[in-house]
Image (tube, helix red, strand yellow):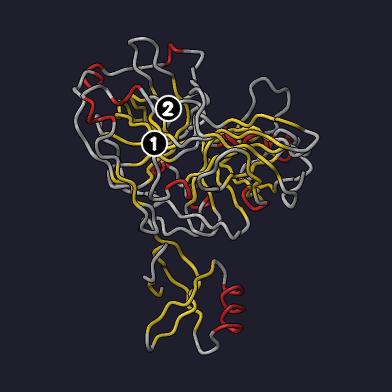
Amino acid sequence: MSIAEATSMSISGKQAKGTSKIADRACRVTTKSYSNMPAKRQDFTIYTADGLRLTKANGPFATGLSPFNRAFPVDDPFGVRRAILPTLLRFPDGSMQGVGTAFHVDGWGTYITADHVVDVVRSHLGPDRVLPGTLHDADPNMPHIVLMTGVGVVFGTVTLEPDVFIAATKVTSIFEEYQDPLSFSNASRGRVAVDIASLSTQSTSRASSSISLRATRWIPELGEVVLAFGYPTLKVTERDRYVRTASISEELHGAYGRVLRIFPEGRGGHNRGPGFEVEADWPSGMSGGPVFNSAGEAVGLVSSSIAPDGDEPGVGYATWLHGIPELRMLTPRLHHENPGRRFGYAVLTFSPWRLHAIFPDEASATSWRNRTVASAEVVYGSHRIGTDEFMVT
């Protein structure tokens, strides 16, 4: 089934919450001096770059119970759902399965997620194509990643428009060379260096809002509270393959976490990227979702977790954006020293001042200017996403 084909789907908002366990619990480390801290009443305001706002006052912190051992559904009157999207694997026959979460960062179709959410796109590539710095395009004739945009409130069975599902046209991951000790040759191989990837998508009429990314100058403090978002209930159930209908269950969840440990150089083994450990319930499906600090900036993303077990609290591991120099390769249009800003080509009128439009490349800006406002100028600079604020550079 191609994107252009209409799909009839039943959308439901509830299902049993999934859990996630890491088989080897011996690697888990807890810090009692922090895990025994009393829960505090605390409000969170999460800002997106275009001014949308979500406030969780009177949330789990208001109950007097520990808020770190359970995820909670998020009522979304301010549209955070437009920036944080369910991520699905679509097969050549049109069937799909949920794999995690991704979030929009630049206003031009670049999304961030965990690499392990999208590593299936490499499964059909030979080892000679999985090399350091490899970029590869999604092949519609092979399993590939799609993002599900918001459809609003529905009841019963509805027909989804073709552009509800946005295909990832390119996947970018961070690779490193290494020598396989079990190999009899001296040839180096590539492996994923950090559990993070970016997805490039084509512009659609369903433009989503953007999350403000804090790529530098944020160091987590022990005991600091962070907040993650994702889709632990994401599920696709095939109903009738003959008429191509399916039932999709998805519900945005939030989950607080308290920082327990910091790993600037990674945790070793298969976890070499910078990260931090939190006391949290980050169920399966939240992988790839943004992790916010109290300023409303995305400072990391959900990587893995150990589910709560009886009286044992859950543990989550986040990829830490601050320690990833290759982040510029994943998000080349962002102004990394200034969260919420991006570099681009603006179509400007200086007297009186007016920002008519902004584009990621000069050719698109010039073409639009020539068709629309011939008297305006095309200027390169830094733009605060979702506003008319622009600085010429």
Q: Residues within 10 Å of mark 1 (few under 14, many from 20)?
A: many
User: Going by the image, does 363 lie left or right of 358?
Assistant: right
Query: In terms of image quadrants, where is residue 307?
Result: top left
Q: Residue at x 28, y 47 (%)?
A: 295
Decide if residue 136 is in sight here.
Answer: yes
Q: Residue at x 58, y 48 (%)?
A: 199
Decide if residue 170 is in sight here.
Answer: no
* Residue bearing mark 1: 228
User: Helix, strand, or loop for circle 2?
Assistant: loop
Q: Residues within 10 Å of mark 2 (few under 14, many from 20)?
A: many
Q: Residue at x 19, y 29 (%)?
A: 40
User: Alpha-carbon distance for marks 2 and 1?
Assistant: 8 Å
Residue placed most toward the observer, 40 or 198: 40
Residue type for callout 1: Ala
Question: Dots 2 and 1: beta carbons under 8 Å?
Answer: yes
Please say if 97 is above or below 28: below
- The image quadrant where one finds the N terminus is top right
Residue placed most toward the observer, 189 or 142: 142
Residue 81, percent from left and from top = 46, 46
Residue 132, percent from left and from top = 62, 42
Residue 69, percent from left and from top = 34, 22
User: Helix, strand, or loop for circle 1?
Assistant: strand
* Residue bearing mark 2: 282
User: Going by the image, does 178 lie left or right of 217?
Assistant: right
Query: In terms of image quadrants, where is residue 275?
Result: top left
Residue 226, percent from left and from top = 32, 36
Residue placed most toward the observer, 208 or 77: 77
Q: Residue at x 46, y 55 (%)?
A: 209
- The image quadrant where one finds the C terminus is bottom left
Count the numbered circles shown: 2
Please say if 221 is above or below 267: below
